[in-house]
Structure formats: structure tokens, C-alpha cells
Image (cartoon, grey):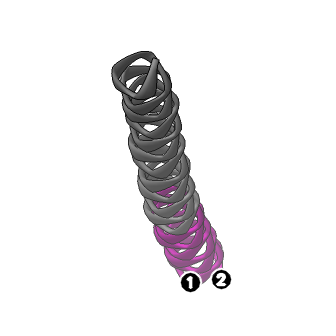
Amino acid sequence: MALVVVLLFLVAITGISVWTARHSMLAEGMARNQMDQEVARQAAESALRDAERDIDTASLGQMANSA
């Protein structure tokens, strides 16, 4: 009888450990995705600023040429 109780206890602890490990891996993946999303957003904003600067420079060049 004691062996059955110990085996059930071992199965329960193993299940809890597996669930905890999977939960931890999921949280780490979500954090990594959030970091990747932030890097992508910053890259997009940088590209937009660069394009705005190119447009401003081009329009100033056209104004200087027409004057």
C-alpha cells in the first residue's frame, strides 16, 4: 500500500515539474517575441526618419534649383 502512495506522489510531483518547465519556456518565448517586436518597431521608425530626411533634402534641392 505504501508503494502505491509513493508512486502516486512521485507521478504528481513529476506532472507539476513538467507543467512548471513548460510554463517557464512559454514565458521565455513570449519575452523573446516582445523583444523582437520592439527591435522591429525601432528599425521601422528609423527607416521612416531616414526616408523623411531624404524627402526633405530632395525638396530643398529642388527649391534651390528653381530659385
Q: Nearer the viewer, mark 1 or mark 2?
A: 1
Residue 3 part of the magenta segment? no
What kind of secondary structure does the magenta stretch mostly adopt?
Answer: helix
Instruction: Please state which of residues 15 and 61 is positioned toward the viewer in this rendering.
Output: 15
Q: Residues within 10 Å of mark 2 (few under 14, many from 20)?
A: few
Where residue 1 appears, as percent x and y from the top left, is 46, 17
Q: Residues within 10 Å of mark 1 (few under 14, many from 20)?
A: few
From mark 1 to mark 2, how far is it between C-alphas? 5 Å
Q: Amino acid at mark 1?
A: Ala
Secondary structure found at label 1 = helix
- Residue 45 located left or right of residue 29: right
Give the extent of the magenta segment: 43-67
- Quadrant of the image occupied by residue 14: top left
Residue matched to label 1: 64
Residue 65, compared with residue 32, is above or below; it is: below
**Which residue is pictured at 47% across the width and 63% down the height?**
35
Where residue 49 appears, as percent x and y from the top left, is 57, 72
Q: Amino acid at mark 2?
A: Ala
Residue 63 part of the magenta segment? yes
**Which residue is pictured at 39% across the width and 44% down the height?**
21
Residue 2, compared with residue 38, is above or below; it is: above
Secondary structure found at label 2 = loop
Where residue 56 appears, as percent x and y from the top left, is 62, 75
Numbered mark located on residue 6 in the image: none
Instruction: Please state which of residues 34 and 43 is positioned toward the viewer in this rendering.
Output: 34
Q: Are marks 1 and 2 in contact (CB under 8 Å)?
A: yes
